[in-house]
Image (spheres, coloured by chain):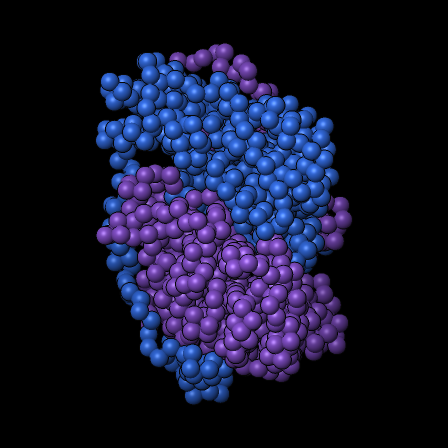
Chain colours: A purple, B blue
Amino acid sequence: MINVIREPLIFEISSPGKSGVRLPALDVPEKPDILEGLPVRTDIEGFPEVSETEITRHFTRLSQMNYCVDFGFYPLGSCTMKYNPKLNEKVAGMSSLAGVHPLAPEKLAQGNLELMKTLEKLLCEITGLDAVSLQPAAGAHGELTGMMLIRAYHQAHGNPRKYVLIPDSAHGTNPCSAHICGYAVKEIKSNEKGTISLEDLAREMNEEVAALMVTNPNTLGVFESDICQIAEIVHARGGFVYMDGANLNALAGITRPGDMKVDVLHLNLHKTFSTPHGGGGPGSGPVAVRKILEPYLPVPVIEEKDGQYHLNYNRPQSIGRVKSFYGQFLVMLKALAYILALGPAGLREMTEVAVLNSNYIRKSLEGIYHLKYDSPTLHECVFSDKFQKEFGVSNLDISKRLLDYGLHPPTMSFPLIVHGALMIEPTETESRRDLDLFIEAMKAIDREARENPELLRTAPHITYVRRLDEVQAARNPVLRWEKR
Amino acid sequence: MSYIPISDQDKKEMLARIGVESVEDLFCCIPENIRLRSLLNLPGPLSEPEILEFFEERGKKNSYDRFLSFLGGGAYDHFIPAVVDYLSSRGEFVTPYTPYQPEVSQGTLQVIFEFQTLICQLTGLDIANASLYDGATGAAEAVLMANRIKNKKRLLVASNIHPEYRQVIYTYTRNLGLEVVEIPHDRLGRVDQKGLESAFNSHTSVLLCQSPNYFGVVEDLETLARMAHSHDALLAVVISEPLSLGLLEAPGKLGADIVTGEAQSFGLPLSYGGPFLGFMACKKEFVRQLPGRIAGQTVEAEGRRGFVLTLSTREQHIRREKATSNICTNQAHCALRATIYLETLGRQGLKKMAWLNLQKAAYALEKLTAFPGVRRKFGGPVFNEFVLEFPSDWNRIAPKLEERGILGGLGLGQDYQGLEKCALVTITEKHSRETIDRYAEVLKEVLK
């Protein structure tokens, strides 16, 4: 992580006449007057000119400024930063799969269609739901698609309805996706256990509510034990239960959303199914639904008949397309390879160890960091900075100090119901040694908070850059390089 | 294989520390009646070689690579320099999360900052975001953004934009009480200016067009911008083949207010359609309405330059339902590939790459229309794609070409009434003179 070479922007090391690649010569007769009638540019002002050596060093140095799962523990809550198996990268790189044009005739892409259909079926089995669309590009996109399906159903039955109920512990994308789908959001307050109160839900639920969006386990890592009663209340007034599947790593192989009477679920292949995050995507956010919502799934739908796969665009009740082509195909391949590698027992063990690791951390840090809710938790646990606040140290300071220990901090920005949150999700792919390193670092930081709080407030000290001024970045936005 | 580095002994000790007897006890919060009593019905576990074999077998069932392909239409087979694969596959780029901790994410953040700069330079606009899912969702986000800026409900969308982009716009706008009006095309294959003029009214937020459009024709953006602005509407341009920007004037310089598009051409394989790379740029004054992540420059405690994600008050994790978009995870790694690609080609390389595409397409157009029966459908200037009209329905010609090993183009009949005899033919720098000549020979034979 410590890198003494300051790496300039590529534009600052550019000099005229250089290029990083030699392109072939034109092998057809050149038409000199070809640009006539076209609005031609004289130059791409400021565009870089560098050699291949410079490109390679530039990106190698930049890469070394990044923390990543390949380097160490990455306990970002709700993000499921598990290890990304290298085999899956190899699979996604196979040119016989990745080299196919998306609009190739179906009969020339039977292998790819079969792989997608196979993944759909496995996801149905894992979720206990009836049909899957692989088209959504990421979790938030899956949420939006799921809400559109619900709206299309209500619309087809005469009234799209007006509201969506969302607990105050929800991830920020939930209310936003509901809003983009044309719904007003009504927030449900969490009870003292951090879960949904049945009385509050029953009071808010009526015939103008299209759906409840619920994350289970929720962002505290707490399982909504009343989920079946919750679903009954919502269903009794003709609403749907939408489940945010971001936390499926706590449930896979143990229980199924379909068995909890959930109607729609999105999955994050880049969380539960180990596909790498890439510094912020690509992800993949398939949507799984109960039979009753299947007619509304995005087009095209993959169908199988006599061993032949076919893309069906003729679905009059479909919400339409949510993305070009069929979704993040290469990400799907990685997820499929992962499920095949685990098998049914491996998938169950994945969940068990994810929950074991999280509870191990929780137990080890209980009493040292404040736990607002003492409900049992599954794959993640949420502490707060309440004890350290007495010494003027915030969750941000604790997080920044963790960087000095060579560890990635937990999630801090939510859940909104825990002030000063430290949301820790270790996942199953961490060794005991790595878990202990984190626990010891957190204990040491607590001691530092008491003895030398200034050390934390000015952290990090040994990273490539020190604490960055985010206020200035927003106040005087510099969002691109410009030639002086 | 479950990628779990916890031994049975570890488990025992950890359970003891937690104070429970078994792992089962950790799940006591899940009611018994919804707990699975047996293992799921899934295949596997498979070993590493078995998994490779599984996928290789499926790969053999794809016969696409045995054909000479002239397919494009929003997904292009371009040459990718070796450094793009090599550098982008570094674990430090593949396995981090979104850069929420800037002190240990300067690599990713500087790459985004460079990507934003490259997109601004290519589009001629002031501000670009970190990425969107793809060109189709980019087009939808662009019209929603214009609607927020102008606060008017009528959206004009050219019928000659990519049909899938149009479909996504319908899906996104349907629930929001917005009116989408399609603008027809003229004989040149461009937006029909007469039809456009009559479609504007005082409720119009935006005209969205594509250039080069789905027929491969370069639009007269300067005129379209003037028309849109005279009606107090914005011009949004979507680009599915941004390689064209190596030669064509930047849309921002011609008056476009928002430019979005698909940057798969910049170093991403065809990938059977995804992951691809949406991008979006706009004029400075609209930055607060721009969707998606944005990286910005700032300083750190010791005064050195650094980069952070910024202007996040536009985003869902802060604004919740009032955010400009629900997008969270985007296409960062694809943007990294595009950045490496563009910086490797550089100023001269990109221009030359575009020149190769333009010249070869012109050669192919001449070759394929050299014998009777085949003609160029639209007269407007093209970049690397063009529409040909054949003597009979394309659905009858395509299979005959296929029998002879050629995928000759994308039929337009299913998306455009009256264009049943037409196909969109795409040429890239990867098509050698011999392959173009071969297509011409086979076509001649098929049409006999």
Residue occupying the point 66% across, 54% down = B323
Residue occupying the point 57% across, 24% down = B192
User: Residue A462 location, x and y as percent?
Assistant: 63, 59
Instruction: Mark yes or no: residue A430 visible.
Output: no
Instruction: Mark yes or no: residue B372 visible.
Output: yes
Which quadrant is home to the N terminus of chain B? bottom left
Residue occupying the point 48% across, 47% down = A321
Q: Is residue A301 toward the left or the right of residue A156 in the image? A: left
Which quadrant is home to the C terminus of chain B? top left
Residue B232 higher or lower than B360, as above or below: below
User: Residue A150 location, x and y as percent?
Assistant: 52, 60
- Dividing the picture into quadrants, the one containing residue B374 is top left
- Dividing the picture into quadrants, the one containing residue B236 is top right
Residue B344 higher or lower than A5, as above or below: above
User: Residue A443 location, x and y as percent?
Assistant: 61, 76
User: Residue A302 location, x and y as percent?
Assistant: 35, 51
- Count of number-bearing discs: 0
Q: Is residue B87 toward the left or the right of residue B369 in the image? A: right
Residue occupying the point 32% across, 39% down = A105
